[in-house]
Image: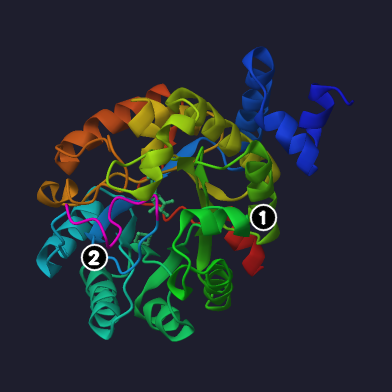
């Protein structure tokens, strides 16, 4: 067996090496995380980019077994944020020099929804003088829809694969065409074809998921050559089918630690991509996002959704900041980011270096 220090000098890892690295504990784990911090600072530097998050709608046609806004959950009041509220949030992002927004939504593909997103994209571009870069996270769509949204002003798209193992994928979703693993892969291909900066990612610590699966996930993200990644711990939600397996899960702390190791390894394997410090990490540890920044992440998505909608957008339980106005959150966030040794890239789009290099 090679020495840890030697393995950590590599840029590529075998599946077995990844399994070993993901499972590190104590001092050895520290070495992995230090190596990731070093790679991050050498390649993308210590800047963090803000993406203002607008949780546009919790109406969803799908029924993923893990998700709190799945169609069968009768508890959340279903909403669409009004146009005015979306534009106010965009204005807030613009005025606070975020330079970038994410519009996330439950999955729908009816014409009214598709046209509404196009409309909002155009309006946001208008009020910001084309200065905001917009990311969409609105699920699987046709090539035509992806093209229409790209043309209307979206630059980036997030579509998590959730798990790259098709057997596990089938255990986490209903068995029907609406939840097809193959279709999700095709959607990722369509996004690439449409010239988006493409982001993907997985949940960590789900029922039936092993470290083997997670090692495969890292290799998958590398293989499809993502420009951006968002990964976070799975957090069980009472009103979902997977809740019945809560006693078989790793502890929250273990899921959190494994998530940090995933971020660290992806940074070493793909030094030029953007990696988000996700809200789910903060749900487990109040300083979760800052910890993720310290091991490789370089993007944070402050929530700009109007507070009155937030309790109806609980993808998982204990979601943080559901009763805080955007501005209050921002002050504490900036201080925490500085304490984590990072600076904030105000007024910068913060496109992934990986994407820029791919364009050349
Ligand atoms: N725990 C953690 N993350 C979740 N997501 C959905 N449900 C959960 C959960 N229970 C994540 C999925 C989805 C993203 C918007 O939120 O990865 O892609
Ligand atoms: Fe809405 Fe999965 S439940 S996309």
**Closer to the camera, 29 or 126?**
29
Residue at image x 23%, y 65%? 59
Q: Which badge, 1 or 2, is on the more N-terminal residue?
A: 2
* Residue 126 - label: none
Residue at image x 18%, y 43%? 326
In the image, is residue 67 part of the stretch drawn in magenta?
yes
**Residue 239 position within the rendered picture, expressed as x and y whole percent measured from the top left:** 27, 46
Residue at image x 90%, y 25%? 1
Asked if residue 271 can be seen in this view, the reply is: no
**Residue 105 position within the rendered picture, expressed as x and y whole percent measured from the top left:** 30, 62
Residue carrying label 1: 220
**Closer to the camera, 16 or 26?**
16
**Going by the image, does 165 lie left or right of 329?**
right
User: In the rendered image, which quarter is residue 57 located in?
Assistant: bottom left
User: In the rendered image, which quarter is residue 332 located in?
Assistant: top left
**Going by the image, does 158 lie left or right of 83?**
right
**Residue 161 position within the rendered picture, expressed as x and y whole percent measured from the top left:** 53, 58
Q: How many marks?
A: 2
**Residue 115 position within the rendered picture, expressed as x and y whole percent measured from the top left:** 26, 82
Q: Secondary structure at mark 1?
A: helix
Residue carrying label 2: 59
Query: The magenta stretch spans which residues?
Result: 65-75
* Picture quarter with ligand 2: bottom left
> Does the Cβ of the disc 2 residue fall within 8 Å of ligand 2?
no
> Does the Cβ of the disc 1 residue fall within 8 Å of ligand 1?
no
Asked if residue 137 can be seen in this view, the reply is: yes
């Amino acid at each position: 067996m090679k020495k840890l220090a030697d393995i950590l000098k590599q840029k590529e890892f075998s599946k077995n090496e990844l399994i070993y690295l993901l499972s590190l504990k104590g001092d050895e784990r520290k070495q992995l995380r230090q190596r990731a911090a070093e790679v991050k600072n050498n390649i993308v530097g210590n800047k963090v980019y803000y993406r203002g998050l607008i949780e546009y709608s919790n109406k969803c046609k799908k029924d993923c077994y893990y998700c709190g806004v799945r169609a069968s959950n009768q508890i959340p009041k279903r909403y669409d944020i009004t146009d005015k509220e979306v534009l106010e949030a965009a204005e807030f992002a613009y005025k606070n020099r975020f330079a970038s927004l994410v519009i996330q939504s439950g999955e729908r593909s009816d014409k009214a929804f598709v046209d509404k997103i196009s409309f909002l994209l155009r309006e946001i571009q208008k009020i910001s003088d084309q200065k905001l870069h917009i990311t969409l996270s609105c699920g699987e769509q046709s090539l035509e829809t992806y093209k229409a949204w790209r043309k209307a002003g979206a630059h980036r798209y997030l579509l998590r694969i959730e798990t790259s193992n098709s057997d596990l994928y089938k255990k986490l979703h209903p068995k029907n065409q609406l939840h097809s693993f193959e279709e999700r892969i095709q959607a990722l291909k369509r996004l690439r074809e449409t010239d988006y900066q493409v982001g993907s990612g997985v949940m960590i610590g789900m029922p039936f998921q092993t470290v083997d699966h997670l090692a495969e996930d890292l290799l998958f993200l590398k293989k499809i050559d993502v420009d951006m990644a968002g990964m976070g711990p799975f957090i069980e939600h009472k009103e979902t089918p997977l809740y019945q397996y809560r006693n078989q899960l790793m502890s929250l702390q273990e899921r959190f630690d494994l998530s940090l190791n995933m971020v660290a390894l992806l940074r070493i394997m793909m030094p030029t991509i953007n990696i988000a410090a996700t809200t789910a990490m903060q749900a487990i540890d109040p300083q979760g996002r800052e910890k993720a920044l310290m091991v490789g992440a370089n993007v944070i998505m402050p929530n700009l959704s109007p507070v009155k909608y937030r309790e109806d957008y609980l993808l998982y339980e204990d979601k943080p900041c559901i009763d805080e106005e955007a501005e209050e959150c921002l002050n504490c966030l900036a201080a925490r980011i500085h304490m984590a040794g990072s600076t904030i890239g105000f007024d910068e789009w913060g496109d992934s270096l990986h994407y820029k290099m791919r364009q050349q």
